[in-house]
Image (tube, helix red, strand yellow):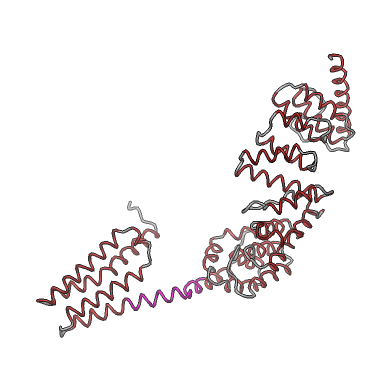
Amino acid sequence: MVRSWPKSRFSLLAAIVARIVVLLVPAALLCLGVVRTTGSSQAVLVVGAAFQLLVCVLTFVTGRSWRQPLAPSVITLYLISLGWLWLGASHLDDWYPHFAQAVLLIVPLAVFAFQALSNSGAPVRRRAVLLAERLARRKDWPADLLSCRNLPEVKAFREALHGDATPGLKLLFNTSVQVQVAALAALEFRKNWRPGQAELVLGLAQRSPESAIRAAAVSALANVDDRVLVEALAGFLCDPSRDVRRAATEAVLWDSEHRWSWIRLSVRQALADPAQEADGPLQFEGQTLPDEAVTDLNGWASEKGILAVRANQTLGAHYARLLNEYGDEELVGALQTQLANVHTPPALRIELANLLRAHGNWNDNILAGVLDPGNPAPLRLIAAEALLARGPDGRALSALADIARVPNREIALATAMVVQRYLSVDLGLPLGQPLPALHTRQAAEVTRRVMIWAAQNEKSMASTS
């Protein structure tokens, strides 16, 4: 059975053969002239043919030339060959010089015309129009509209819209939501907008009741550099849809070093929005947060309510990213200093403690400082757990007994989990299960048991001393 070649291989082979033939035609015409002339004219054509062949050979053996456009080489070789032909065969009175001159003039002119047409963008625009019509007629769409960006047709449409977004913008007036989302996905992170085009996309995002359209429109405008547009995009950080909020986060924060002063108020409003409490930290791809943003987040972390919680979470995510990407001693030292500072907001200290523990950046001095009774109970509990993970430790036992007496059921349950896991004391927590809800009977029973354990442990330590 004969194995067939893929279509792409045949296309590549045909392109290589066509390139070789086109470049060799001038030398072939001069060689034909050598046969039809004598004397000095023949010598001139021999030299010209040899020169053309030498240039062709150098072109074929040089790998870089295969990656260069063909048009300049063709125009140059053909016009030089025309000069050699005029010197060596202009006196002939038969069909050959007229035929050769016609070929040497028509081919470079045709190549030049094709190059000019390509540079005008007309073929690409025509391809974009055809792809737009194909998308408008498409009936089979993914159930998840946001996954339209991964369709092969959308990817091809994105490439075709590189020079002019007009064919894609026309699809925004289509009545199909799927077609609109596909068109916006093809415009995703576009840099070059003509006057009025970005405003058209923004208007669609602000009017559309479909979250998929709003998310795709926000992503399409992520590369705009106009302050008014960026501030309008930042307003989508408080959109009712989580997908839109996620798209807006990516769109406005990827270049936060340049945009932070434009978007900081919108970011603060989003972090303080009770409807977004479950979103957690603001996370995005691209650049890390600038120092100006970190300063603002530290200030917000010292306030109260959801704003402080999410600001601390965002700072924790920011520092985790820095540790994963860099993790140098200077950064670790700065985080350790911030953790040890009693003026750092307690919630942020807890975030830093969990982060440093996860990356193995604890040391005895930090643990001893964090175990101090003057620190918040959740922070002391993290340090006690870190010590017990290494093995039995009297300092950790004393801290756990002290923390267990704090009149807070949530802290009591967390303490019970540490005691049961590392000290093998059964306090009624199911193994491998999440902690019980705070207002359940089981939670009350676990709290009672851990307080009894704390009292017994205190008596035991007192009798030992």
Horizontal side of 133 relative to 368 (left or right) equals left
Horizontal side of 112 relative to 215 (left or right) equals left
Query: Which image quadrant is residue 232 in?
Result: bottom right
> Is residue 408 shown above or below 388?
below
Horizontal side of 43 relative to 112 (left or right) equals left
Q: Which residue is more in the foreground, 365 or 239? A: 365
Q: Residue at x 65, y 41 (%)?
A: 331
Q: Residue at x 78, y 50 (%)?
A: 299
Magenta part, dominant SS: helix
Q: Which residue is more in the foreground, 356 or 111? A: 356
Could you say where residue 418 lies in the image, as x and y percent from the top left? 77, 29
Magenta span contains residue 257: no
Magenta span contains residue 113: yes
Q: Which residue is outermost to the left?
A: 39
Could you say where residue 70 lies in the image, as x and y percent from the top left? 35, 68
Could you say where residue 160 lies in the image, as x and y percent from the top left? 52, 68
Could you say where residue 241 lies in the image, as x and y percent from the top left? 74, 58
> Is residue 260 shown above or below 427?
below
Figure disc tally: 0
* Magenta segment: 108-127
Horizontal side of 174 relative to 350 (left or right) equals left
Classify the position of the C terminus by image quarter. top right
Q: Residue at x 74, y 30 (%)?
A: 367
